[in-house]
Amino acid sequence: MSTATLYGIADLGRYGLGHRLLAWARCVIWCQQTGAQMLAPNWLGFPIGPWIRKEPDKRLYFPLFRSDAYISGWRRMQVLMSASRVDALQLADAGPNQRGARVVVLKNAVSGDADRYFPTFLGHHELLLRELRRMTRPKFLPAANNVPHIAIHVRLGDFLKVSEAQIKAGAHNVRLPIEWYGDVLTGLRERLGSTVPAVVYSDGSDDNLGPLLAINNVMRAPGGTAITHMLSMSQAALLIGTGSGMSLWASFLGQVPRVCFPGQRLLSAFSESGWEPECLSASELPDSFVSSIQTRCQRQR
């Protein structure tokens, strides 16, 4: 039996919030399962892309999170200076009887981690939502919203414009036709028999979103940080989303059913099937899915 004191730390990498959360979530779950103590991850980073593209969200994540949610400050520095480190992927080869302190590093790769690790998060949404809210500074936590509503996530920014055939083939990080969001919303409302309020979350301008914002009872979410919008979307009755990590995380954390463009349900946010249908129009949605959304809206009243 090992006599080592175990710590875990997430090496977040330098990409967007959804990608960085992969390593953080792995570390949270691993520490919970092993009893290891978690060291505060380093959210510091200054990406230049959002500044060049003049995006409203500059993707500066270190102001959003409390470092004292985990071991931080001088104590964290002491552990990192004195303990031996081992990559989580080589942990089995590190020797079971090592004495002293060990820091297990759960590191983000440049690509492939979402496919590899997100399926392992299924079933842990309550733990991860609780930890994410605990780590987020109070001023960035959204107010509770119990009013039945549909969240619409429109990702533009650095996402590319490609053909519909490429989108359907599963291309990553691509823009969806703006008309699709409105068509799905309008068709779904008709099937629900109710003009359920809809809230648009987007990094695009009002001009970009014009056709969607012109629809009755559709409003744009107030300006906010990525974590505020993600946690806000996790409170919706339904999410009409993109193939981005933001949509995936919001759906997963709140277990919010989501409608996806064909080819863009790149990963599943649910252990059970049927909660993330792909469609070009609301008429393609199964009756059972529409009925479940109706029930969710009634429960949130």
Image (cartoon, rainbow, N blue to C red):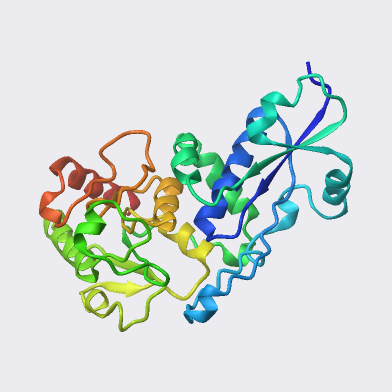
Nearest to the observer: residue 86 or residue 44 = 86
| Among the 4 quarters of the image, the one containing residue 135 | bottom right
Q: Is 244 positioned to the left or the right of 187 in the image?
A: right
Examine the rendered structure and indicate whether residue 235 appears above or below residue 34: below
- Residue 127: percent from the left, percent from the top? 55, 40
Residue 17: in sight, yes or no? yes
- Residue 244: percent from the left, percent from the top? 39, 57
What residue is rendered at 69% in x and 58% in y? 66
* Total count of labels: 0
Q: Is 245 positioned to the left or the right of 75 in the image?
A: left
What residue is rendered at 62% in x and 41% in y? 28
Quadrant where the N terminus sits is top right
Residue 142: in sight, yes or no? no
What residue is rendered at 25% in x and 72% in y? 217
| Among the 4 quarters of the image, the one containing residue 274 | top left
- Residue 225: percent from the left, percent from the top? 53, 69
Quadrant where the C terminus sits is bottom left
What residue is rendered at 17% in x and 57% in y? 188
- Residue 202: percent from the left, percent from the top? 39, 70
Nearest to the observer: residue 229 or residue 92 = 92
Examine the rendered structure and indicate whether residue 141 appears above or below residue 129: below
